[in-house]
């Protein structure tokens, strides 16, 4: 408790004292090499990176000991890190799945392509829908209740119906992935519009904006922070639903690979696919975050 | 003492209903929902693209009526709820203390949080087969996956909440002579409560998704299995019955959490 | 309790000064204090060679431009962080130096800029927080004492409300009550009335003056509202821009108890001119340095 208290207290003082530094930095580009370097230097001076390393290596070690050395109860069948790595990085993998095989990349590509289609569709439909709902009360009155009625149904329970609705399994997997992303995007966009301070609308009207201009110059940028929060969530849901869709109904793709590896008792492949999925999920949400920062310079400056 | 007398609560509810009836939005909402229902029925009658593949409203209603009188239907409810209950409760019991511990102790956090960050992006469902390898029976592995779904969400929310406590409150408490214990129980815990509830709300959603999919993939019972079996056995209207049931079940669970939240955090009621 | 006269005094009409014995505790000595921060490699000298002596029972007001280190100094007295050089004493006991830091405690209670009433506790629970966590009273005893305190402070009507349900002026009064409940040696107020509308502010200021007159606690008050400084303070200390130092000390020889007639008096206007002159120069420097107003 004690170190934490000091830390939080320091954080506040830091914010107070950092103000002057911030005002000097304002003219500089938001992320210069010098700043990055000083940040890295600062981070290396704290305990965080070392403890993180210990934590991660420690968990790997525990995994290895339990599954491959001790072979503890319950862990007998679990593939250990050595087994996984020797498959993953082998030129001649036992189960045909490593960084040197084309199959591996084909599955990755399939999954990414599905997420990309579904996510793009959800964004293209969800963002305007959310904006319109926030913009026009009448439209919201009609559409929002329908939305709220459908929303409690977990996305994954759509899988069988989706298979019925669309010809071919590909479309139904994409549809389920799309659903996951769509609700999060739309709702957050709506929330974003509703979070905009009334004062900005009045100011814009005083300055002579038309409805159209208000839509593009107040509503859109004003809702942007929430939209990106929504996109962050929605890309996560996309992967979540994709895995289910591929496991149940898919051909190819990482979710399918996981299921297939399980059925054919190729356990190391299962872990490879899980880790790959985790990495792709993290990477795609980092991309969304980066795009958000690029589009919302004013927020970055405020925080810096 | 601070609670208003019961009568006024009823009165305010009546007022709320009266206001709802006067509001144009209520009627618009009803119209829209009815329109969707009509479209749904018309879809299969008129053979509209895509919509015609969905079992019609009337056939779904018939199936629903059959299901309501079928004891097996309720067994599905019970099985799914049992899994949710076990997995979610386990996540709460382990996740809340661990999250608070990680939020308040810097070194523990720096040691363990990266591990969570690395594991978190792996979708909970991807754990289903791994969990099936690990646990000796299917039931355990479904519950474990349900637990995982809520667990990560809870931990990350609680750590975030505990870290973003306004330093003023801790300073004020220390200034008033609070010990470390007091700061934890009287400041950190109530201040983190909203984040815990957010974690629970999101977590229960993930739980239902996970349970449904896990039941479809691996289990022989529950609402998810009911839905999947209906597909496999070509009783398509039952698919929709299953979906609606899952929706209602999810709604009930998140409603319980909402009520719990209002009970636990009376200071938030005004805003 | 010390505040027993408060209610009578709170009527608004100025009676003769209540008979309170001279304060004997709460003397603060700040000797040659320097405070340096080093966040992320940015070297910030917040306070430098700062010295001041505050006699027991004085209403001391610190004014200065934003970010001049006022709050830093207050935090050091409160025990939230240490000093880099120099010493701070409370009643000739060392509070902090470059080697020593004393944990925050109920003898020096802080009222924060934006208020720090615990939103999850009712007004009464907030007020009795100190005695309960210090183990000075049992809960029922504390509740009784808390009710008594709220009654004396004219706040008994809201004892079961949550802070979010009462006005900002009321919140400040509750926070002062929460501090007084602990009978502290020193009250540390960090721009407590900032962001309050002018009318509410005058009410709460008068309220604070009444509490002060009735209790004779040492008050360490930070503000950048100059009128407030003169109206409330016995002495006004003007600080320079960062690194903060005491630039000027102004004695406010306006008799207590004070009320709003003070604001239109000759002596008040002269003092105000004096303070403005001292502060303006520093404010300009700070402004030109590109300092941003802190919200």
Image: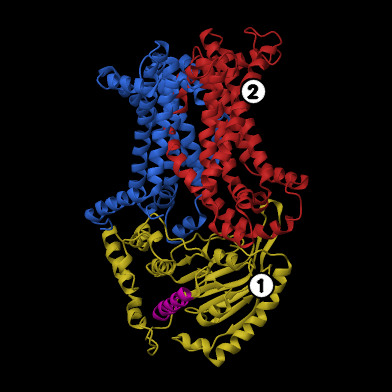
Drawn side of residue B30 relative to residue B123, left or right: left
Q: Are the residues flagged by discs 1 and 2 in contact, CB closer than 8 Å? A: no
Highlighted range, magenta? C199-217
Residue A113 is tagged as 2
Tell me the quadrant of the picture where the N terminus of chain C can be found.
bottom left
Q: Colour of chain C?
A: yellow
Is B70 above or below relative to C112?
Answer: above
The answer to whether residue B122 is visible is no
Which of discs 1 and 2 lies nearer the camera? The answer is 2
- Residue C45 is situated, as x and y percent measured from the top left of the image, at 69, 63
Q: Nearer the viewer, residue B207 or A212?
A: A212
Q: Secondary structure at mark 2?
A: helix
Residue B258, magenta (yes or no): no
- Residue B269 is situated, as x and y percent measured from the top left of the image, at 37, 52
- Residue A242 is situated, as x and y percent measured from the top left of the image, at 55, 23
Residue topped by disc 1:
C245
Drawn side of residue C153 relative to residue A46, left or right: left
């Amino acid at each position: 408790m004690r170190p934490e208290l000091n830390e939080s207290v320091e954080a506040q003082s830091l914010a107070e004292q950092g103000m002057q530094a911030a005002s000097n930095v304002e003219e500089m580009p938001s992320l210069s090499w010098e700043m990055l370097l000083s940040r890295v230097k600062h981070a290396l001076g704290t305990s965080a990176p070392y403890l993180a390393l210990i934590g991660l290596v420690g968990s790997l070690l525990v995994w290895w000991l339990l599954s491959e050395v001790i072979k503890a109860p319950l862990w007998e069948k679990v593939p250990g890190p050595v087994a996984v790595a020797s498959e993953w990085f082998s030129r001649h993998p036992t189960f045909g799945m490593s960084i040197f095989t084309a199959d591996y990349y084909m599955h990755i590509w399939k999954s990414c392509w599905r997420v990309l289609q579904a996510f793009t569709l959800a964004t293209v439909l969800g963002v305007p829908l959310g904006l319109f709902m926030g913009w026009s009360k009448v439209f919201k009155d009609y559409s929002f209740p329908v939305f709220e009625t459908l929303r409690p149904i977990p996305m994954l329970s759509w899988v069988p119906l989706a298979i019925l609705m669309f010809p071919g399994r590909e479309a139904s997997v994409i549809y389920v992935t799309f659903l996951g992303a769509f609700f999060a995007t739309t709702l957050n966009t709506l929330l974003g519009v509703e979070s905009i301070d009334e004062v900005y609308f009045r100011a814009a009207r005083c300055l002579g904006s038309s409805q159209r201009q208000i839509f593009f110059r107040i509503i859109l940028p004003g809702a942007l922070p929430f939209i990106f929060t929504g996109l962050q969530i929605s890309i996560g849901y996309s992967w979540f639903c994709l895995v289910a869709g591929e496991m149940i109904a898919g051909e190819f793709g990482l979710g399918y690979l996981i299921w297939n590896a399980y059925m054919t008792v190729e356990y190391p492949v299962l872990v490879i696919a899980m880790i790959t999925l985790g990495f792709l999920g993290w990477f795609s949400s980092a991309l969304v975050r980066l795009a958000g920062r690029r589009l919302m310079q004013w927020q970055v400056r405020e925080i810096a | 003492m601070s609670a208003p007398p019961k009568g006024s609560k009823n009165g305010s509810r009546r007022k709320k209903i009266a206001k709802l009836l006067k509001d144009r939005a209520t009627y618009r909402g009803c119209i829209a929902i009815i329109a969707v229902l009509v479209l749904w029925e018309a879809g299969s009658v008129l053979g509209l693209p895509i919509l015609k593949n969905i079992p019609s409203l009337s056939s779904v209603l018939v199936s629903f009526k059959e299901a309501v009188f079928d004891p097996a239907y309720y067994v599905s409810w019970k099985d799914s709820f049992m899994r949710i209950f076990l997995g979610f409760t386990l996540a709460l019991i382990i996740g809340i203390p661990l999250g608070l511990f990680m939020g308040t102790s810097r070194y523990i956090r720096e040691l363990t949080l990266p591990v969570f960050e690395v594991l978190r992006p792996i979708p909970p469902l991807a754990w289903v087969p791994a969990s099936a390898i690990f646990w000796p029976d299917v039931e355990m592995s479904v519950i474990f996956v349900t637990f995982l779904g809520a667990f990560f969400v809870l931990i990350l929310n609680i750590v975030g909440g505990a870290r973003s406590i306004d330093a003023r409150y801790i300073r004020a408490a220390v200034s008033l002579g609070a010990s470390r214990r007091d700061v934890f129980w009287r400041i950190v815990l109530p201040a983190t409560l909203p984040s815990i509830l957010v974690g629970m709300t999101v977590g229960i959603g993930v739980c239902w998704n996970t349970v449904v999919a896990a039941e479809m993939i691996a289990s022989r019972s529950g609402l998810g299995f009911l839905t999947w079996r209906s597909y496999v056995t070509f009783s398509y209207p039952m698919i929709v019955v299953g979906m609606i049931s899952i929706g209602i079940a999810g709604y009930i669970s998140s409603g319980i959490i909402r009520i719990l939240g209002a009970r636990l955090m009376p200071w938030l009621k005004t805003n | 309790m010390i505040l027993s006269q408060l209610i009578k005094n709170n009527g608004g009409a100025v009676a003769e000064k209540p008979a309170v014995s001279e304060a004997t505790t709460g003397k603060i000595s700040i000797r040659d204090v320097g405070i340096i921060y080093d966040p992320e490699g940015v070297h910030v000298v917040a306070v430098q060679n700062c010295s001041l002596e505050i006699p027991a029972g004085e209403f001391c007001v610190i004014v200065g431009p934003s970010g001049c280190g006022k709050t830093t100094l207050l935090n050091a007295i409160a025990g939230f962080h240490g000093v880099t050089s120099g010493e701070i004493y409370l009643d000739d006991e060392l509070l902090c130096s470059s080697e020593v830091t004393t944990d925050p405690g109920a003898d020096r209670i802080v009222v924060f800029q934006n208020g720090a009433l615990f939103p999850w506790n009712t007004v009464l629970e907030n007020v009795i927080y100190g005695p309960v966590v210090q183990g000075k009273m049992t809960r029922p005893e504390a509740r009784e004492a808390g009710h008594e305190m709220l009654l004396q402070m004219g706040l008994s009507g809201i004892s079961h409300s949550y802070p979010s349900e009462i006005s900002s002026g009321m919140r400040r009064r509750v926070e002062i009550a929460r501090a007084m409940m602990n009978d502290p040696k020193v009250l540390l107020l960090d721009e407590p009335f900032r962001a309050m509308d002018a009318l509410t502010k005058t009410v709460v200021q008068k309220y604070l003056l009444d509490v002060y007159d009735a209790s004779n606690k040492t008050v360490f008050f930070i503000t950048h509202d100059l009128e407030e400084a003169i109206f409330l303070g016995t002495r006004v200390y003007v600080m320079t821009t960062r690194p903060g130092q005491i630039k000027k000390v102004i004695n406010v020889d306006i008799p207590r108890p004070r009320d709003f007639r003070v604001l239109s008096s000759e002596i008040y206007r002269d003092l105000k001119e004096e303070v403005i002159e001292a502060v303006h120069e520093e404010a300009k420097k700070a402004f030109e340095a590109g300092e941003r107003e802190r919200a």
